[in-house]
């Protein structure tokens, strides 16, 4: 009689170890298009804004090149943000539970997820930050058109365009600073999600519990 073969032991991954797709390839490509165009806009904009920072233009091909390409990069940035908004419109809308989350903003800043209402795919802070950045992008585009074609507008409109562009550039830089801090330091694993597209079950349960249950098909 032939000896029975021992069955291989299959170890099932627990939810904390399981890999969950957070962003697909299309979402990641759009995100990095937004990021790279914003970086170019930031550096070229600083070079054009202040003589003390004009040395940055040498890193981007010289002053003539950045004057040409800065507006086009702004159009690319705005279009990429628009596509992102369309793709994530349901995820980014502020629902009643998000307004409850906003009440705990200070607690979230000081103590992290402890005691804060559960989040969907994006928490209310991420949503608010996105809409601020999207609004800034729209205003920067409109005011940028005034600066792009100064001969088409009156002196008063041109001055208003300059001031508006500067103010919302500062707002946009503030938003991206918070975004970078949260993605790189405050929420470890967020950067990996946007690079590889995946997170662990433990990460999802900790930071976006409602989204985790929906993806895993878990009902309360």
Image (cartoon, grey):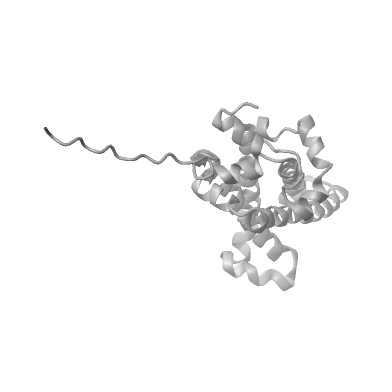
Q: Please say if 65 is above or below 80.
A: below
151 to the left or right of 17:
right
From where the camera sits, is residue 12 visible? yes
**Residue at point 80% right, 47% down?**
105
Between residue 39 and residue 13, name the one nearer to us. Answer: 13
Counting from the top left corner in percent of width and height, residue 53 is at 70, 70
Asked which quadrant contains residue 184, the reply is bottom right
Quarter of the figure with the C terminus: top right
Between residue 154 and residue 11, name the one nearer to us. Answer: 11
Q: Please say if 86 is above or below 55.
A: above
Residue positioned most to the left: 1
Residue positioned most to the right: 156
66 to the left or right of 164:
left
Counting every numbered tag in the picture gives: 0
129 to the left or right of 30:
right
Counting from the top left corner in percent of width and height, residue 199 is at 54, 45
**Residue at point 76% right, 56% down?**
174
Between residue 184 and residue 203, name the one nearer to us. Answer: 203
From where the camera sits, is residue 121 visible? no
Counting from the top left corner in percent of width and height, residue 187 is at 65, 53
Quarter of the figure with the N terminus: top left
Counting from the top left corner in percent of width and height, residue 121 is at 64, 37
**Residue at point 58% right, 68% down?**
59
Q: Please say if 56 is above or below 102.
A: below
**Residue at point 71% right, 41% down?**
123
């Amino acid at each position: 009689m032939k000896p029975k073969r021992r069955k291989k032991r299959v170890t099932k991954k627990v939810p904390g170890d399981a890999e969950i797709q957070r962003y697909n390839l299309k979402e990641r490509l759009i995100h990095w298009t937004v990021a790279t165009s914003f970086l170019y806009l930031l550096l070229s904009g600083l070079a054009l804004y202040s003589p003390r920072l004009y040395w940055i233009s040498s890193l981007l091909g010289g002053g003539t090149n950045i004057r040409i390409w800065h507006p086009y990069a702004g159009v690319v940035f705005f279009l990429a943000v628009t596509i992102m908004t369309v793709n994530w419109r349901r995820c980014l809308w502020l629902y009643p539970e998000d307004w409850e989350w906003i009440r705990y903003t200070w607690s979230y800043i000081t103590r992290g997820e402890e005691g804060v209402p559960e989040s969907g795919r994006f928490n209310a802070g991420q949503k608010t930050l996105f809409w601020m950045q999207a609004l800034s992008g729209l205003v920067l585009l409109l005011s940028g058109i005034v600066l792009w074609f100064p001969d088409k507008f009156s002196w008063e409109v041109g001055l208003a365009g300059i001031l508006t562009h500067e103010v919302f550039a500062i707002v946009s830089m503030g938003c991206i600073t918070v975004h970078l801090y949260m993605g790189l330091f405050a929420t470890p694993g967020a950067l990996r999600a946007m690079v590889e597209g995946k997170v662990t079950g433990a990460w999802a349960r900790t930071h976006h519990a409602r989204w985790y249950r929906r993806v895993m098909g878990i009902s309360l």
